[in-house]
Structure formats: C-alpha cells, structure tokens
Image (spheres, coloured by chain):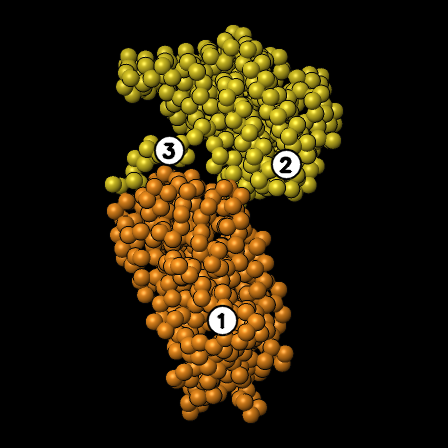
Chain colours: A yellow, B orange
Amino acid sequence: MPLRYGAGKHVVFIESYMRVYLDNNASYGKLPGIEADLLEALSHGPLYNPGSIHSDGQRARALVEGARDILEELLGIASGEARVIFTSGATESNNQAIFLPFWRSLNREAHLITTAIEHPCILEPAARLKSLGVKVTKVLPEEGRIRVEQIINALTPDTKLVSVMLANNETGQLLPVREISAAIRERAPKCLIHSDVAQVVGKIPFTFSDIGVDMVSISGHKFGSLTGTGALVVRDGIEPESYIAGGAQEQRWRSGTENTAGIYSMGLAAKYVHTHINERKCAMEKARDYLKNELLTKHPELQQTTTDKEETLPNTLHLLVPSVNADDLVVALDLEGVSISSGSACSSGKPLPSQVLLAMGYTEEQARQAIRISVSAEHSETELKFAAEKLCLCIERMK
Amino acid sequence: MSTNDHVNITGKTVVAMSGGVDSSVAALLLKEQGIDAVGVSMQVWDYRKNGGCDSKATCCSPDDFTDARQVAAGIGIPYYVFDFEKSFRKEVIDNFVQTYSIGKTPNPCIDCNNKVKFAELRERAEKFGCKAVATGHYARIKKSESGYHLLRGRDSKKDQSYFLYGLSQEELSRTLFPVGEMTKEEVREVARKYGLTTADKAESQDICFIPGNVQDFLKKHGKVDTSGVIRTKSGEVLGKHSGIHNFTVGQRKGIGIGGQENPLYVLSIDPNSHDVIVGQKEDLEREDFTVEELNWVSPELSDCIGEEPTHFEAIAQLRHRHSGVPVTVNVKDGKAHVRFSDEWSTVSPGQACVFYDMKNEELLGGGRITQSL
C-alpha cells in the first residue's frame, strides 16, 4: 500500500471527537452554499484556459469575468473607478503593490512608508526594496496604535507609496486608513496609497472609495474561497507594471493563465458574504463575545491586546496567556479538537515570537504567550460551548 | 510483532520523529497497531545560525523536519515541531565544551537522550494529555512481575540501549520502542513497502551539531586556549599540542609524535597544566576504574541499591560500539568501583559505562566514568 502518492485524502488526523475551527483569520472555514455551484462547474471537466479563442476557453473566460463583476460589486467599485486584477493571493498582490511605484525609480531618490505591524508579505518586499536603495520608513505603533499624524510626519517629497493595512491579522485592530488617505491627499497628491484589506473582506462592510486608497490587496481564502487566489484592485489610470512577466494576461497586470476554478470559487464566496454581510458581522461578534466572556470569567489573568473601546475585526479575540507558551497551547488544543493559532511565524521551522506584538512594545516573553482565536459566522452553540470548555481546560493544564 | 505489551495504551502516544527511517517506521507501526500517535520533532539546534550538519549525515535539521512532516502526513498522524534549543544548549553543548576543557571526553548523544529528548518530550507529552512516548531506538522493553526490563535491540549491530541507561522504571512503563524487535534491513523493508520518503535515507552519524572539526567548534563556543606539551610519565617532553580537546585517553592515532619504537597512546590529560601524558599500550590498561552519576535501570537493582554496599558481576560496555567485557561491580556511596574480570582494558573518563547482565542482554544501569587511575 504505497502511501506517499495520493496520500492526504484518506487522512483523518484526529478522529472520534468533535472539532471546532477557530482559525478563520488564517483561512476561512467552510462557507455554506458555495460547494454545490463549485462542484457543478467542475463537473464539466477541466476549466480550460480563459485566454483561448475557442468556445471552451470562452466558457472559462465567462467564469472569470463573472467573478470579477461580483468582486467589483462587493467592493462597491463604480464603473471606471478601478479594476480587479486576479492574482494568486494577498502575498502576490502585496508584493506587486509594494514594488509597483519603484520599478522605474530604483536609482533615484524614492521613499516608501509602511507600518511595523504589517504582514510579512509587505515587510519582506519592503526590506528587499531597501536593499535595492529605496528609503523605507516603518512606522512603529505608539502605545500600541498607529496614528494618522505618524504617517503624515513621515511623508517626504520623495514618498512614492504609503501602505497601511486596514486590519491587523493578529490583534484584529482596525487602522485609520480612511483618515490617513485623506490626509495624504491633501499633502502629497501624487503619492500612491495601498492597503492590505485581506482580513476585512466578508467581515465588515466597506467600499473601495470609502477608504480612499489607490490599491487594495484581497485574499480569496480569507473569506471562503479555495486557496491560491486573490486580487489586487487598482485605481484606473495607474500604469500597469507587471510583477510577473509573460503572456500579459489580466490587462497586462499579471501574466500567467488565470486560476479559473479558484477565481470562480472566489466569486461564489464574494457573492455569499456580500449578500449576508451584516448578519454575518453580528454572528461573528456574538460568537467572539461569548468566548471572550467565558474565558475572561474563568481565567481573569488573560489579557486582551485590544481594548473594548477601539474598533476591531468582529471575529478576532487576541489574548496573552501569562506564563504559558502559546505554541504549546496551540498543540494541546489541537489534540483536544480545537484549532487556533499563535502569532508566531514558524515557516522556517523555528518559531519566532510575534513580530506584531514586539513592534507594539510587548516583551519577547509576552510575544510568545499570545493566542489568536478567530471565529466564523457559522458556529453552533454546541461548538462554541465545546471550544470554551477545551480552551479553559488546556490553559489550566499548561500553567 | 508486538513491542507494546508492557504499556497499557488508552490515550495518545507521542512519537519522536527525527526525519530518519527508524523513527518514521516507529510512527508507522504505532499507527498500524491502532495507536493514536502524535508525531513530534525536536528543534535542538539552529543549524542556519550555528552551522553544522550537512543534511546527509544528521538528524534534526530543517530538511529532516520536512521529511518527518511528509512521513507524518503520509501515514496520517498529526505532527508538530518543538523548540528545545535552550535545554539542548544548557544540557548538551555547555557540557560538551566543559568536559573537553577538563581533559575528558564528552558523550553528547547520551546527554541529549537523557536530559533533552526523554525529559522534555515527556513533559510536553503530559501537557498534551499523551500517556506514552515512543522513539525509533533499537532497544526493547519487557515487563515481568518485578518491573520493566530494558533489553538490547534485536539487531545487535544497531543496538542503541547504551544511550538509554538514564531511563527510570517509571519512564520505561510509558516508553515504546516499536522497531526494537526488528533489524535495520527489516525497518527499511517496511519503509519501502509503504513508500516512505525516508526508506533509503543515509544513517545519521558523527556529532550532529559539529559542522567541521571539534577544535573550530570549541573555539567558537568560547573555550579558552588549552595548548600545552606532550610528555611521558617520567616527564620527558616529546612535543607540543594545540589543545587538550584533541586528545582522548586511549587514543593512538593523531598524537603527532613520530619516530618512536612502539606506537604511543594517550594515558592521561592534565586539565590544569594542559599536559598530555603518553606511553605504551600496557601503561594504559587498567584493572579497575570508577563510575559516578549512576542510574540503575533494572527493577532488581533500582530497588535494592541504596545505603548498603552492593556487589555483582556484569558485562560492561565502555563505548557505543564496544562489545562489552566481564567486570565485577562494587557499589558504595553512590559510586561504582569496577574491576575487569579477565583481561585489563582501557577506559576513557567522561564516557558512559553501561552494565548489562551476564548474558549481555539486559541493561542493568550505568554512569559516567570519572577516573581510570
């Protein structure tokens, strides 16, 4: 019985008890109502190449363009305001956006402003630009928050791009992007503004023009589509500068055959979350507040990294668990049937403390104690009760 | 082949996965036996920062974790990596450097097994609600009325019980060695049959955290200059050397003194003057030596050795690939005085001396050789 190939499908990691998925900021759990449509589309065979002239290709093209329409609707994009460029996800979109204004000015005085609490897919391309000679300012939070004046004070005549995320993926705190955009427009009208909105889509209603930026990055699987698909939304009038060179797909913005199935699934997910946005936001808040109350009542030593007064993602509960290693807690909970995450980045094998918390001024020890619970809009009461019990049990056991 | 009879497994079991074929098959066998296995790798050393281990001859490097993860996914068990760097540095690296600096020969694999792998792993396992710990060691555990017996692995060429003398009865009761009844070739066969990516992976060897030579490593890790002279017992200086860590008691090759009638052996090392004392093979052979930091594994000995002096015969294994020699052991005040029964032999202070029963099958206990003179 060779296991290596075709392995995975048969794998049921931990059976025999209930599982509750509370890591919806990493990848959104199961979204109701899109499976049937997706399977129906896939049942017609491969989804072909949307760039082909023949009618098989045209069918694929129709799926892609349908998804583009839905995304435009979801983001409230008016005709001629901006275009949706499909990418492989927010990482690619962010890389593209960060590099965009600098391709032609690498050898000249050029300046990028971003914040120290961005996702690595902003900070790493920024570091790469820096190594190529671009001046980079990473604004550090003051008392845990990024303020509009900090960004404005960092502006120079050479600032080509400001990139500020709309919501932080770990803490869930919202950043004042709308106010930042307005202030930049007054002082530096030529400066491009980008925002990584990956965590906000499907959780809080907003439109592209609301936040007043030139570009936003979107990730499909953060709101229920297949992974490997996302978009960069670009205000009309900005010249394409392809990060990935090749066949000039996506109106010369992004070469490579479109991920037809992924894009179609993103369209289905976008349609669903757009239709149900307000009730979903309420459901998420309710689930989060239930867990918050249960946990803080039984474990008053837990510390929230955001205050109840500030605006946060409706689904995110970010907690410091004093004297407990968050990575160990994540494993313990996994074995008990609850999926959460810590803020650590461990793709390299060695878990590093949460870079976001370090930037916010927490100690390294605290930055290793943070857990992120991110709920969906679809939990049953039984699930939440189970999760709260397991969370309390494991926190108690790890002490 | 069932190697788990001695453990009543009702919950989950942690299986340590190094990314090698032995622990891969250990995990697979647990899963096949219906045990709820949880794969775990231990990050003990930052190879990127500190160097070490080209991936052909190691365990626990990032590439090995990729293999372990692939195996775990293939056989369908959860898998996690834990950071044990802090305790590895404290228990293994610091001790390694310190032992060399006092003229003794360290055995980092024993420290790693006793103080890091089993100790830390067990602590995590308990926190995660896992009842038992399994590894890919070639060793066996049998239960009798008196308790748990640690036996050499069925494959005498691969037997690794020598490294496990630090285990307690309590630990044995919750430890599994799924490949202990198998030969290396059988293990590889199973791995091939199941298409495990690690089936034909090379053996790990040498000291996993030393990239090049020991000398460079010691220099990098803050050891001071221990150069000195090479002399005979009577004080005749034969030459100079660049550091005492280059020498091990009993060593013949690489002393760097030519033109002698008979080959020279390192007899002893003076950690204070940094003198390396050399002589003939006969000078090296001892009739007795002392072992400290003792741990008694067999249920009979772990129960009866206490205040009272104890006396017994055993087979002593003095190095990893040593076949063992008959000895008489006198235990008193926490020290074992060991006398060779037949021929005299050489011993290296700092190395582990592990006692087996007279059939050279059951591990009785062991400790660290403190002196040979």
> Mark 1 and mark 3, same subunit?
no
Looking at the rendered structure, the kind of residue marked 3 is Val
Residue A246, numbered circle? none
Residue B287 seen from this side: yes
- Residue B87 percent coordinates (x, y): 57, 55
Q: Chain of mark 3?
A: A
Vertical arrangement, residue A297 with respect to residue B142, above or below: above
Residue A394 or B116: which is nearer the viewer?
A394
**Mark 1 vs mark 2, CA separation in Å:** 43 Å
Looking at the rendered structure, the kind of residue marked 1 is Gln
Q: Residue at x 55, y 56 (%)?
A: B88
Q: Mark 2 vs mark 3: which is more N-terminal? A: 3
The mark tally for this picture is 3
- Residue A373 percent coordinates (x, y): 57, 28
Residue A12, numbered circle? 3
Q: Which residue is mark 1?
A: B351
In the structure shown, which secondary structural element does the residue marked by tag 2 occupy? Answer: loop
Q: Residue at x 65, y 28 (%)?
A: A296
Residue A136 seen from this side: no
In the structure shown, which secondary structural element does the residue marked by tag 3 occupy? Answer: loop
Looking at the rendered structure, the kind of residue marked 2 is Val
Q: Residues within 10 Å of mark 3 (few under 14, many from 20)?
A: few
Q: Which residue is mark 2?
A: A321
Q: Residue at x 39, y 71 (%)?
A: B357
- Residue A247 percent coordinates (x, y): 38, 25
Vertical arrangement, residue A297 with respect to residue B294, above or below: above
Q: Residue at x 53, y 27 (%)?
A: A387
Q: Which corner quadrant of the image does residue B322 belong to?
A: bottom left
Q: Chain of mark 2?
A: A
Q: Chain of mark 1?
A: B
**Mark 2 vs mark 3, CA separation in Å:** 30 Å
